[in-house]
Every structure is written in structure tokens, then in C-alpha cells.
Image (tube, grey):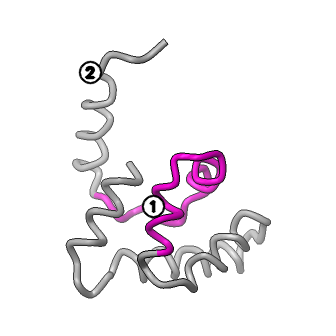
Amino acid sequence: MARAVAEAIDRDPSRRGLERARTTCERWRRQAPSPAVEEWSRILKLEWEAIRHVLLDPGEQGRRLRQSSPFCGILSPRERWEIYRRFMSEPQAA
């Protein structure tokens, strides 16, 4: 999912998805501050390439941050369901 979000932002020279994530994060900070939201707030002040690196980080930090990702709403419902369908049809590693 994160890879699809990064690709969508990469394709858009105006980076509207990135601005949407920043707006979402700011709203979360006002409504329900948390350590994860504060961490994303700091990350979202970086340049896109650094943010993209964090978003796609396959390690523990990346997995943890994706649990509270402000990039919701970047992909359409159709795009998300297509990703879910592909994931469900792939053989799962044991």
C-alpha cells in the first residue's frame, strides 16, 4: 500500500498527496495528539525524497510508522481494493 502511495505522489509534480498527508497530520495533532502523530509531523517537514524513504522503510521503524500513516485518502477505494485483491491472491510465505 505504501509503495502505491509513494508512486501516486511521485507521478504528481504538485505533490498534492503530500500536502494532503500534512493537512491530515496537522488535524490529528489538534484532535488527538500522540507520539506517532508528533513523529509524523516532524517527518513531514522533510523533503519528499526523505519522506518517501521513511514511508517505504521495510524495517521495524517503517512498519511501526505505517500503522499510523497520515497518507490515508491518497489512493482511491478502487486502487486500495485492487491492492487487497492482489495481496490476497499471492501465495503467503510461511
Q: Verify CB contact (< 8 Å) between mark 2 and mark 1.
A: no
- Label ID, residue 35: none
Q: Nearer the viewer, mark 2 or mark 1?
A: 2
The one nearer the camera, 2 or 93, is 93
Give, as a three-letter code, the residue at label 1. Cys
- Residue matched to label 2: 89
What residue span does the magenta drawing correspond to?
Answer: 50-75
Crowd band around label 2 with a 10 angstrom C-alpha radius: few (<14), some (14–19), many (20+): few
> If you read the primary sequence from the N terminus, does the residue marked by circle 2 or circle 1 appear first?
1
6 relative position to 36: left or right? left
Residue 63 painted magenta: yes
- Residue matched to label 1: 72
Residue 84 at what x, y percent from top left? Answer: 32, 35
Q: Residue at x 52, y 47 (%)?
A: 58
37 relative position to 79: left or right? right
Q: For residue 81, what is the image quadrant? A: top left
Residue 94 painted magenta: no
